[in-house]
Image (cartoon, rainbow, N blue to C red):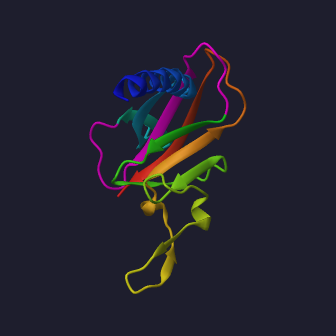
Amino acid sequence: MNGVFRPWLCAMALMIGPQTAMAAPAVRLDTQMFVERVTMDINGRARRTLASADHVGPGDQLIVIVEWRNEGRAPVKDVAVTRPVPRSARIASDDPAMQVSIDGGAHWGRLDDMWLPTPLGGSRRAVAGDVTHVRWLLSDAVPPGQSGRLSYRATVQ
């Protein structure tokens, strides 16, 4: 019986392997994070500049940029561009195309529609500090080589 089982198992592995590899979209994601600094110029006007987010502190305004690119040889459709939110950050974006998760990516939706249980058995509306992940859905077919940029703002707590 082992002689019959092994070839069948190998054949199944060969059939499943390529399908799994083909099903995974070849979309590369790169994330950059900057701190928005506001300074006054000599005329008293506010100047906004972006600096590296190497050193951030409470109250700093972050700009997170997610660049995506289809590096595959075929168009991909229904791609979810998903990124974790830094632990100490509170999202400040109201992009209608952006969905959020407050449970590590298990459930998605608009922040206004999210609720969390309270210790006493009730529930409360989720707030920006509860967000663990953000995502955007690219529902249109993305041709090979096409790229794009998405971003959101957050405040360091």
Q: Position of residue 139 (x, y in %)?
A: 70, 36
Please report the residue visible at 37 percent of the width from the left and 48 percent of the height from the top.
86
Examine the residues drawn in magenta and state their main secondary structure: loop
Please report the residue visible at 50 percent of the width from the left and 42 percent of the height from the top.
45
Q: Specify start and end residues of the magenta stretch as a single range.
A: 53-77
Give the left or right position of residue 73, taking residue 67 as reference: right
Figure check: 14 above or below 85: above
Q: Nearer the viewer, residue 32 or 74?
A: 74
Please report the residue visible at 30 percent of the width from the left and 45 percent of the height from the top.
56
Figure check: 86 above or below 115: above
Q: Quadrant of residue 62?
A: top left
Please report the residue visible at 53 percent of the width from the left and 57 percent of the height from the top.
107
Q: Nearer the viewer, residue 2 or 102?
A: 2
Answer whether residue 65 is visible to the viewer in this image.
Answer: yes
Q: Position of residue 132 (x, y in %)?
A: 43, 54
* Residue 68 belongs to magenta span: yes
Residue at the far front: name it: 1
Answer whether residue 43 is visible to the viewer in this image.
Answer: no
* Residue 133 belongs to magenta span: no
Give the left or right position of residue 56, taking residue 62 as reference: left
Q: Position of residue 108 (x, y in %)?
A: 56, 55
Question: In which quadrant will I find the C terminus?
Answer: bottom left
Q: Nearer the viewer, residue 60 or 109?
A: 109
Figure check: 146 above or below 121: above
Q: Position of residue 67 (x, y in %)?
A: 52, 28
Question: In which quadrant will I find the N terminus?
Answer: top left
